[in-house]
Image (cartoon, rainbow, N blue to C red):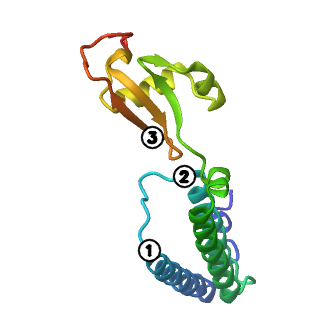
Amino acid sequence: MEFERIFLGELTWTTVLEILLRTAVLFLYTLILFRLVGKRGLGQLSPFELLIIVALGSAVGDPMFYPDVPVLSGMLVITAVVGLERVLVRVTEANRSVEKLIESVPVCVVADGKLVQENLDKEDLSKAEIEMLLRLQGVEHLGDVRRAYLEPTGRVSVFWSQTREGSGESILPAD
């Protein structure tokens, strides 16, 4: 085993400094673009937002590590990805059909205290998975839920029944 070759490869001190400079420039540039784009909820990402993050990660990473990839190329790709994201946000705000295509829509997974199996199947969600998501929202019995929706972010919105008397199937795990 050649640990020096594995960890350092052909790196020289000037290459290390170049990588650090490239990383700092692209990191700061991306941070500035994110601040200009505005606040977005980072806690719950839609598939579209996740795609943006993956695309940006790739665009930022290559010029940081590879000396043959110019920093300006990375900046152009980052700018293009952020620009496309802004355009798509505006298009989805103006056109409900495009929004449904790109962002998805909420899907009813519980109706009147019963799981909507057809919708769970469409979303490729098991009974155990939806029960876990419901428990995270404080649900103990399905009968207490008037409606529950699987949101595009993967979270579940719960609308409680009027009575909330602990009726219906318990979704608590066995002790």
**Residue type beneath disc 1:** Gly
Instruction: Kindly report the distance in space between the C-alpha atoms of the residues bearing marks 3 and 1.
Output: 23 Å
Give the labeled residue for mark 3: 155
- Say above or below: 159 vs 71: above
Q: Are marks 3 and 2 in contact (CB under 8 Å)?
A: no
Task: Say what secondary structure mark 1 lies in.
Answer: loop
| Residue drawn at the location 39% of the way across and 10% of the way down | 169
| Residue drawn at the location 66% of the way across and 63% of the way down | 6
For the N terminus, the image quarter is bottom right
**Residue type beneath disc 3:** Arg
Task: Say what secondary structure mark 3 lies in.
Answer: loop
Give the labeled residue for mark 1: 38
Instruction: Kindly report the distance in space between the C-alpha atoms of the residues bearing marks 2 and 1.
Output: 17 Å
Q: Quadrant of residue 145 in the image? A: top left
Label 2: few (<14), some (14–19) or many (≥20) C-alpha neighbours in 10 Å:
some
Where is residue 36 shown, x and y percent of the image?
46, 81
- Give left or right: position of 137 versus 126: left
| Residue drawn at the location 41% of the way across and 69% of the way down | 39
Pick the residue in front: 105 or 96: 96
| Residue drawn at the location 45% of the way across and 51% of the way down | 44
| Dot 3 or dot 1, earlier in sequence | 1
Task: Say what secondary structure mark 2 lies in.
Answer: loop
Give the labeled residue for mark 2: 46
- Say above or below: 49 vs 60: above
Asked if residue 130 can be seen in this view, the reply is yes
Where is residue 5 shown, x and y percent of the image?
68, 67
Label 3: few (<14), some (14–19) or many (≥20) C-alpha neighbours in 10 Å:
some
